[in-house]
Amino acid sequence: MKRFSVFEVFKDVVKSTVEHIEYSLITIDSRDVKEGSIFFAFKGEKTDGHLYIEQAISKGAVCCVITDENYYDANKPLVLVKDTLYAMRELGRWNLGKFNGKKIVITGSVGKTSTKAILSLVLSQKLKIYEAFKNFNNELGVAIVTSNIDLGAQYAIFEIGTNNPGEIKSLSEFLQPDVGIITGVGHSHIGRFGSLKEITKEKLAISEGVKKDGVLWINDGVDTSYYNFPEGINVKKFGFSKDSDIYIEELNVEKEVNFIVNFNNFRYCFRINHPFSHFAVNALPAIALAFENQFHYEEIYRGLDKFVPVEGRGEIIRTQNKIIINDTYNAGFEAVLSAVENLSKIDAPKKIAILGEMAEIDGFEEKLYSRLKNEVEKRNDIYFYLVGESFKDFQSLENVSYFKDKSELINADILKGDGVYLVKASRSKRFEELVEYLKKGEENAV
């Protein structure tokens, strides 16, 4: 439990029925409230958190933080503030000030959540770890996870994302990481940034918050030649280049990925229980940090061996006659290319890629779909079911069937055979419905 002074921490309090709060959980979802929670009532597009104040209190909330004075009641544990996000952010700042462990902050166009999970699995073999839950990586998400930080942890692991220029710098300066990690740079949100170079600058701005004498690990595929890093931070690289501080020397893909890592001129063999090779690259910062914390090889190996992708991020589902790869969370350009390349490396007689339209490439559709078409044409070991208007021009390819929507694909009655099925799309396309259909076979899940 954590205890704080309402007026000292929140700063923008209008009035309050409580002076001190002792809490165990911060939440914005009344369904998650339990004994000892603080419920922050946010007004959203679809609902208003103020409508759930009574429910939260009945479930054991020690306090509700609100902005609508119409709901203020002197007989209930309520704090009326001007801005709930600002109040929560200040609570997060207070927690960070109390935290004596080290902070790892991850950004990148792809791989943030899996890198965070791998770091947690490896480092927790020997250390107490706080892993920021879910993929809470925007301003609100970071406020939530810092407000919930375990003050007794030796390492806290966060991820940060961006929708607009300046957000990475702001979040990094708020978190002040001891260790920063850039997993890679891709075309996600390119419509808002205008070029890959501007996206790269945004990701590299994580360096502005890294502590003096801190470390910034960067995927060696990221061009950093034009960026002036702040003085006092140690920039290191990871990937496949022999010039990097840690790199993969050899990699073999079968049902799993076996790879040899070179770190400080020593070679180590590791395994990821998944056929997608990018997870091996995502593991490199964890391996390096573990060795730097005097971990034994066996401890690192054991942590990596426990890694399983979460639902929608490369999750493998085995049915009687199918292997389904549920990769329905992200469909950025680089993520799609990587998934297709990984599918191609799998040794199987029948491989099918079901792709939805790419996301977050506004203004660059023609260029990126043209590049994707060339990639699809080269992969003659894969048959593609392409869903969405953006794929119309792909119909001339011999290894492609085009469908205008999910229903048309299902009604074509072609998803019943055996084989390895990659289902790749963004969250908004709800391709998890196709995953369910593949799992159930004859039953229509849509």
Image (cartoon, rainbow, N blue to C red):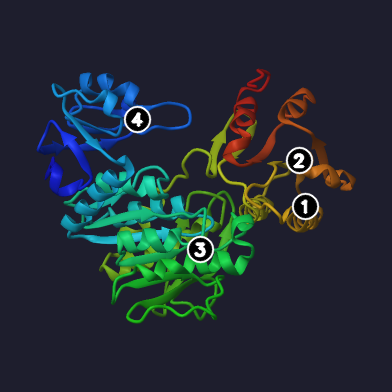
Of the image marks 2 and 4, the number of the one nearer the N terminus: 4
Residues at discs 2 and 3 in contact (Cβ within 8 Å): no
Tell me if residue 58 comes above or below residue 285 in the rendering.
above
Of the image marks 3 and 1, the number of the one nearer the N terminus: 3
Nearer to us: label 2 or label 4 = 4
Cα–Cα gap, marks 3 and 4: 42 Å
Which numbered dot is residue 29?
A: 4
Residues at discs 3 and 4 in contact (Cβ within 8 Å): no
Residues at discs 3 and 1 in contact (Cβ within 8 Å): no
Nearer to us: label 3 or label 1 = 1
Q: Position of residue 59 (x, y in %)?
A: 23, 21
Residue lying at 35% horizontally and 28% vertically, measured from the top left: 49
Which numbered dot is residue 376?
A: 1
In this orientation, which residue lies closer to the viewer: 61 or 420?
Answer: 61
Residue lying at 60% horizontally and 69% vertically, measured from the top left: 197
User: Which amino acid type is shown beneath numbered disc 1?
Assistant: Val
Nearer to us: label 3 or label 4 = 4
Residues at discs 1 and 2 in contact (Cβ within 8 Å): yes
Q: Residues within 10 Å of mark 4 (few under 14, many from 20)?
A: some
Residue behind mark 2: 386
Nearer to us: label 2 or label 3 = 2
Of the image marks 3 and 4, the number of the one nearer the N terminus: 4
Dot 3: element: strand
Of the image marks 2 and 3, the number of the one nearer the N terminus: 3
Residue 185 visible within the image: yes
